[in-house]
Image (spheres, rainbow, N blue to C red):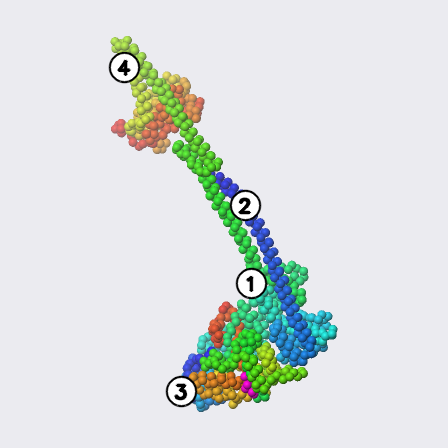
Amino acid sequence: MDGSQVARLAQDWAWDESRTKLQLKLRRDVLFHDGTPLTPKVVAQALRARIAAHSVSSFASVSSVSVTGEDAVTLQLTQPDSFLLPDLALVSIAMPGKSDIGTGPFKLASQSGQQTLLRRFDQFYRGRPAIDAVEIDTYPTQRKAWASMMRGSLDMLYEVSRDAVEFVEAESAVNTYKFPRAYYIPLIFNVRHPVLKNAQVRRAINEALDKDALVQEGLRGRGRPAEGPIWPDHWAYIASAQSTTFNPDAARLRLDAAGYRIPPVTAGQMPSRFSFTCAVWAEDARFERLALVLQKQFADIGIDMRLEPLSATAFDERALSGRFDALLIEMAGRSLSWVYRFWHSPSGQVVLNSGYQSADSALERIRRARSDDEVRRGVVDLMRVFTEDPPAAFLAWQMQSRAVSAQFDVRAEPNRDILSNVWQWRPVAAPASVSR
Amino acid sequence: MRRITSRFVLLIATAAIAPLMVYGAVSVTSLRRANNESVRAGNLKVAGQVAEQIELYVTNNIRVLQSLGSELTATALATWQQDRMLKDYVLSFPEFREITLFDSSGNVLASSALGKSRVALPEAAAHAAKRIYIAPIRVDDDFLPTTTIAVQLTRLQQNTGWVVGEIALEQLWRMVDNIRVGASGHALIVGEDLRLIAHGNPDEKRRIASSEQATTNAALKFVSAFRAGGVPATQYLNEAREDMLAVASPVRETGWTIVVEQPTTEAFATTRRLEGQLLTAIALALLVTMIVGYFWGRTFIQRIFALTRVTRSIAEGKWETRVQMTGQDEIRELGDAFNSMADRLVELREDVRKQERQAMFGRIAAGLVHDLSHPIQNIGNSCKLILKMSDDQEYRETFRRTVEREMVIVKRVLDDLRNIARPIPLERFPVDLNKSVADAIEAMLPHAETAGLTLKAELASQPLYIEGDVFALGRVYRNLILNAIQATAPGGLVVAATEGHGTRVQVRVYDTGCGIPSDRLNAIFEDFVTTKRRGLGLGLAISKKIVEQLGGSIAVASEVGKGTTFVIDFPRTEARPIALVAG
């Protein structure tokens, strides 16, 4: 929950003094789905393949992976990288050359079209799952999935839409479990935009946003306002004293001072200080209402935000190519590594091309930190940079709800995703399968 | 006694309990009928109000679109302004998933949708005569029911376009969810095509998205019947087999029907509670009546029981017992009268006893006179003669025998009197019963001859022995035989017979005499009771006393005009007379 790592395949780990050598001590009782034991050799081989792909930035710091004992693997780094450990936690270890054979509680049985069938893996190292099988169905919209659950076709709904959650919560045959989701919604600015390149404009935009109203009207109250891209429950997070507060008058003054006054009315056009276009993912209804609320709030201070719905493919292409004024998107934020990945200027694999570089120094300090205190100081610096020269309007952290048939005891813990312990779910009555 | 109690209980039951129960039954029935009607009427009113709310909901949405249409047409707005206005309306009125502005040809001018508008101008609206068109419920892309409202825009009586809003029925659900009748009564909305649009029971919402809803839901069948002219209220079992009270009300604007469902256990809970209270009150009244009746009746009957107890006590000879009565009613008067009667009875009893004593004294005196006058007279006469014939040796001898004989008689009378008052001294030895009877017969033969009748013995063939006093037994035989001789007319027969029956032996003395009237038969063994004109009447009393002292019993049977039989019964003994043993 707070970004710290917990023991799983690696039951322990240790850095050397120079923070350039990381030794992972592996469990000895882990089997792959085909019965092959998990050995340091297999793990090293899998890690080498992932590192070679440079899927995350920290892997670029790894110079070698070697087996250093019957249950140990050691990673040698060229320089310290505090993101390596959280990045390793996100790596799924699969049999080399067989990506569908892993070590999890369920193994892939079949996959066709929109349906995936998983079977219980009896030798799962944390215990035998109680559910025989999990059938995963994919739906184009949350509303359609909810309608399917209403008809009794599903035992679990991966995500209950904000519009439907109150109805699902009221249903006695279904239990809903909400938890704070470490995903935030930013309105990302392209700092190459002639107006948005001005940091004062971006600060004014942040001041103009009533994030509480955004959460209430745009997210139906299912979330909390965001101050930045760092998960507020992260161990290194310290609330910034310089955080931006809702102040539309200050925003107007700042824009006036920056030279963006409201011009005289022109026929057929909105009288605005300036305009920009915000790309919105058209296929996800979650963003539509939020975009409309944003547009209305911007209009109140004389900013004309035009909305451009885009397909997922077009949206990604624009984000990577940098051909956008602004983007309304959802981003993962539990790990500082992900903050780096999104908000550091592209140096390798491009994830987001907004032209923003102001936070590079602070992010680099966090990455190369040799202690937790250095990480915390880096986070404070980063938050200050994001306040003074914001790359985006960080709108809200989301609250997510999952729905599960009351036929299952999911052993829910407060504020924790129930999927983290799916292997412990138990049928309350007759055995059944779970699907979404 | 029990009959009085039973009658009393019956009286209370008839007078109090039965009317109470009849009253209770009538009251409960009337109460149930009235309350059920009241509940139905109340729920119908709620359904009507819900229908009005739904109408208001639909009307408000129409007004929103009309207002939007007015704003759009009143001023010459730029496209961007129309676009923003539509978006503002969608944000302000969450009932609308999307609002789109069409020109008169059906082309989209502006839309609240970010991309391509999902809403199309309903074809029926374009051809409808009305300026407002509400489309039938349809299933949208997500398989959820949706409807569309189209409002025509006019300027100078010319159609300038349409504002079409797509209603998100989830918003309607929120309104329906807030409608509650009692704790679990809820409303549901059924569309024109009998499709469930909204259901206030969260667990039943899944039916909205189910294609089988129309054939399975009892509410929909009820709505179908209601629309065909059926009653607006009914009861049915829902899918959970719960008995529901359902009422229906139409929504005029849309052709929908509102159904308000409430479990009958809840709807009629007040009725049940009132019934319970009424039944409790009646039961309480019954209980109080019975308790009061019991205690009051007990007080009443107890005094009768007291009277009975005193009556029995007096009957047992406790003449001093009196009944203590409380109260001032007739029972008290009865008790006082009873006590007066008892007092009077005591006085009468004393009078009777006095008279009896006097009669007894007279009888004893007469008997003594009878029994003693002859011997005394004989002695007196002999004494007079002895004065004259004192020199006559023979006469002196006769005088001596006469005096001695008469004195024996006097002594016997006095002995009898003494034996009545105290136990008779007896010497018990084995006695040959046949011999003792034969001796008595022999001794009494002269009397029989004098009386001119036959006296004989009929002795058992085998010897019969008892433990007895031979002299006392002789006296008993003599008494019985003498009585029989005296009661039998000349020519009659007197028999003394002996019999043995196992461990018992009997002496039977019977005659062919006048017999004893049955009303006197029971008293003949009492002291001073005799059937003869004269005498003390102690013979049979003393005989009975002797027999019982010897361990036997004596009984009598008699028939007037035919004769009398006395039966003396003794236990047989195995012992033998001393002489017999010695011999």
Please name the residue that numbered disc 1 is placed on. B184
Q: Chain of mark 4?
A: B
Above or below, comparing residue A28 to residue B286 in the picture: below
* Of marks 2 and 1, the one in the foreground: 1
Q: Nearer the viewer, residue B170 or B441?
A: B170
Residue type of the residue flagged with mark 1? Ser
Residue A382 position within the rendered picture, expressed as x and y whole percent measured from the top left? 49, 85
Q: Cα distance, mark 2 to mark 1?
A: 40 Å
The segment highlighted magenta reads A196-203
Above or below, comparing residue B392 to residue A435 in the picture: above
Residue A201 position within the rendered picture, expressed as x and y whole percent measured from the top left? 56, 85
Residue B204 position within the rendered picture, expressed as x and y whole percent measured from the top left? 58, 67
Please name the residue that numbered disc 2 is placed on. B18
Question: Local crowd at mark 3 within 10 Å, few (<14), some, or many (≥20)?
Answer: few
**Mark 1 or mark 2, which is nearer the start of the sequence?**
2
* Of marks 4 and 3, the one in the foreground: 3
Question: Local crowd at mark 2 within 10 Å, few (<14), some, or many (≥20)?
Answer: few
Question: Local crowd at mark 1 within 10 Å, few (<14), some, or many (≥20)?
Answer: some
Are callouts 2 and 1 both on one chain?
yes
Residue at horizontal 54 percent and vertical 70 percent from the top: A169
Residue B174 position within the rendered picture, expressed as x and y whole percent measured from the top left? 59, 69
Please name the residue that numbered disc 4 is placed on. B400
Residue at horizontal 53 percent and vertical 45 percent from the top: B17
Residue type of the residue flagged with mark 3? Asp
Please name the residue that numbered disc 3 is placed on. A16
Residue B551 is covered by the magenta coloring: no
Q: Nearer the viewer, residue B560 or A155?
A: A155
Dots 2, 3 in contact, CB < 8 A: no
Question: Local crowd at mark 4 within 10 Å, few (<14), some, or many (≥20)?
Answer: some
